[in-house]
Amino acid sequence: MTTQRTFSGPIVTCGMQQDAPGGHRGSPDGEMNWADLLAACALVLVIEGMLPFMNPGYLRRMLETVSQLDDRTLRVAGLVSMLSGITLLYLVR
């Protein structure tokens, strides 16, 4: 005899939504939460805008330095950035 678990809503602990049994996260019907995606995009814009707002001269110097890097170095930096973001997202979510 097997028992079947059912899930009827999000598990909320200290204001943080937990994964549902089986690792499913989001709405029960599997739709994407657009508000979370837009909030993440807004946060990226805020963070990226901080450096030019606080220190535009440094940004210019940094962009000159980056423009002189070879393609391989830029690709490795991009890969490291993506992997770091994925790891952080995995740990947070």
Image (cartoon, helix red, strand yellow):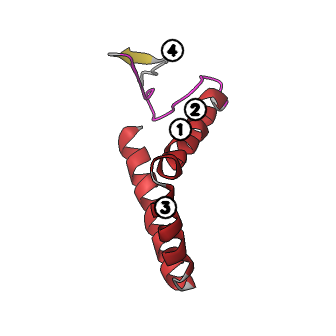
Query: Label 4 crowding class (10 Å Cα cut-off): few <14, some 14-19, many 20+?
Result: few
Span highlighted in magenta in the image: 15-31
Q: Earlier in the sequence, mark 1 or mark 3?
A: 1
Q: Residues within 10 Å of mark 2 (few under 14, many from 20)?
A: few
Marks 1 and 2, how far apart in space? 6 Å
Which residue is under mark 3? 57
**Disc 2 from disc 3: Cα separation:** 29 Å
Label 1 secondary element: helix
- Say which residue label 1 marks: 43
Mark 1 closeness class: few <14, some 14–19, many ≥20 residues within 10 Å: few
The amino acid marked with disc number 4 is Gly
- Does label 2 or label 3 sit earlier along the sequence? 2
Query: Nearest the camera: 92 or 18?
Result: 92
SS state under label 4: loop
Name the one closer to the observer, 12 or 29: 12
Dot 2 falls on a residue whose secondary structure is helix
Q: CA distance from mark 1 to mark 4?
A: 27 Å
Q: Nearer the viewer, mark 1 or mark 4?
A: 1
Write down the residue under mark 4: 9
Q: Residue at x 32, y 16 (%)?
A: 14
Residue 37 visible at all: yes
Observer-nearest of 4 and 86:
86
Q: Amino acid at mark 1?
A: Leu
Checking the image for residue 39, the label placed there is 2
- Label 3 to label 4: alpha-carbon separation: 50 Å
